[in-house]
Image: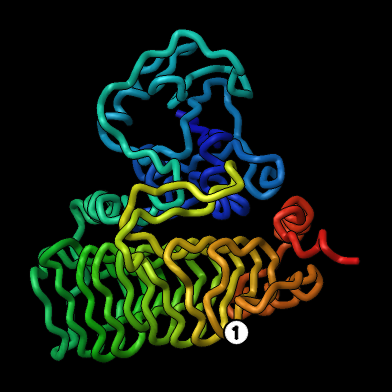
Amino acid sequence: MNIILFDDPEIRINLLPFSYTRPIAAIRVGILTIAEKWEKYIGHPCSFSTHESLSKKFATRFEDDNLWVNGAICPDEDFFKSIGALQLGEGLRKGTKVLAYRTREHELPEIISNVSEYTPPFTLIDQTWRIFQYNGAQLRSDFHLLTKGRTSQPIEDQHTRTYHPEKIFLEEGVQLFATILNATNGPIYLGKNSQVQDGAIVRGAFALGENSIINVGAKIRGDVSIGPECKVGGEVSTSVLFGYSNKAHDGFLGCSVLGEWCNMGADSNTSNLKNNYDNVKLWNYAKKGFIDTGLTFCGLMMGDHSKCGINTMFNTGTVVGVGANIFGDGFPRNFVPSFAWGGAAGFSTFQLNKFFETATKAMERRNVSFEENDKLMLEELFTSTAPERVWEKNRV
């Protein structure tokens, strides 16, 4: 079964800034990315059909029989069985939205007939806040998917205290130092060669990616997913870090999503609750304005390669694009465009050559190369996001 995970254009724009730099299915929610979930179900890699700007980095693989699946869908047993039963020329939809279609063609037809309405419930990541909103449920589902029939590595540190150890799973090479692991409210998954340092308190549901570190004295409050190669400290609740990002110091991160190669300066904080308890409004790239999330709790959405200096304060419901650098006193605006440089006092543009220097250094620290495809993608993004940087229009 050759599964191609396609980006629905309407969903893609609602998932910016995260979908600026990856296909929808490469978004992490739970322990795994959406694509990794599908690969666990089918037993081999999937490919992507995504925006033209990403197609060189994320290529599409075609065969004589292709099953196109909406890349925003997190698989479950019912949906997997339903798409497996599709014949050539058949598909599934929910209302007007195509969920899956099987064809010999090397593109998804513009007009699709012979599609059946899919009625069971399913998980669709169609807004940025869905990532943290559904993270706890997906983490529990992924934990079962990854650990079924397997045995955890033993906890050898005599000073680590566990609650419900049957719901705690350690991969090879995990290091624990006098920590508290409380899986009462959900499972705890510690990836290969990850580390939880002295005095950290971790409540499930929680996932720590390969080679990631929870720093000394951290407080992890549950429904938190940390991807690979991250360093996390301070207080974190109901949040997702995709990977290769740091929130290494004290400060609160709640109901938030950080992309890859992000860095939060020491004592930086996010607000995830308005003082008047109103629903949080969040910047939407399709509307070019703020929309009501319907949520009381919503913090920070930060795109790849964005960073903030020490003591940065993010107001409730802030969206930061790709490649921004934020610093200074006061609260920055609730929408920070891509490649912005500054803070509450105003912004200038993070020039592309300087951005490339920073990105190259940051990636080298993780032994990852800043490749030509990354450069071309980000050059195009710099140009396409210029209208968001309104200060550029005001230059004399």
Report if residue 264 is visible in the image.
yes
Residue at 58% over, 13% down: 111
User: Which color scheme did the rendering employ for the protein?
Assistant: rainbow
Report if residue 303 is visible in the image.
no
Q: In the displayed structure, would residue 160 be above or below residue 58?
A: below
Instruction: State left or right for residue 186 relative to residue 173.
Output: left
Instruction: State left or right for residue 326 relative to residue 162.
Output: right
Question: Splitting the image into 4 quarters, where does residue 151 fall?
Answer: bottom left
| Quarter of the rendering occupied by the C terminus | bottom right
- Residue toward you, 329 or 232: 329
Q: In the image, residue 380 lies at what x, y percent? A: 77, 52
Q: In the image, residue 384 lies at what x, y percent? A: 75, 50
Q: In the displayed structure, would residue 84 be above or below residue 239?
A: above
Residue at 32% over, 21% down: 118
- Residue toward you, 76 or 131: 131
Q: Residue furthest front?
A: 276
Question: Splitting the image into 4 quarters, where does residue 345 fall?
Answer: bottom right
- Residue toward you, 5 or 130: 130
Q: Residue furthest top?
A: 114
Q: In the displayed structure, would residue 58 be above or below residue 365?
A: above
| Quarter of the rendering occupied by the N terminus | top left
Q: In the displayed structure, would residue 205 be above or below residue 95?
A: below
Residue at 39% over, 49% down: 293
Q: Secondary structure at mark 1?
A: loop
Q: In the image, residue 81 lies at what x, y percent? A: 29, 26
Residue at 79% over, 68% down: 352
Residue at the disc numbered 1: 328
Number of callouts in the render? Answer: 1
Q: Amino acid at mark 1?
A: Gly
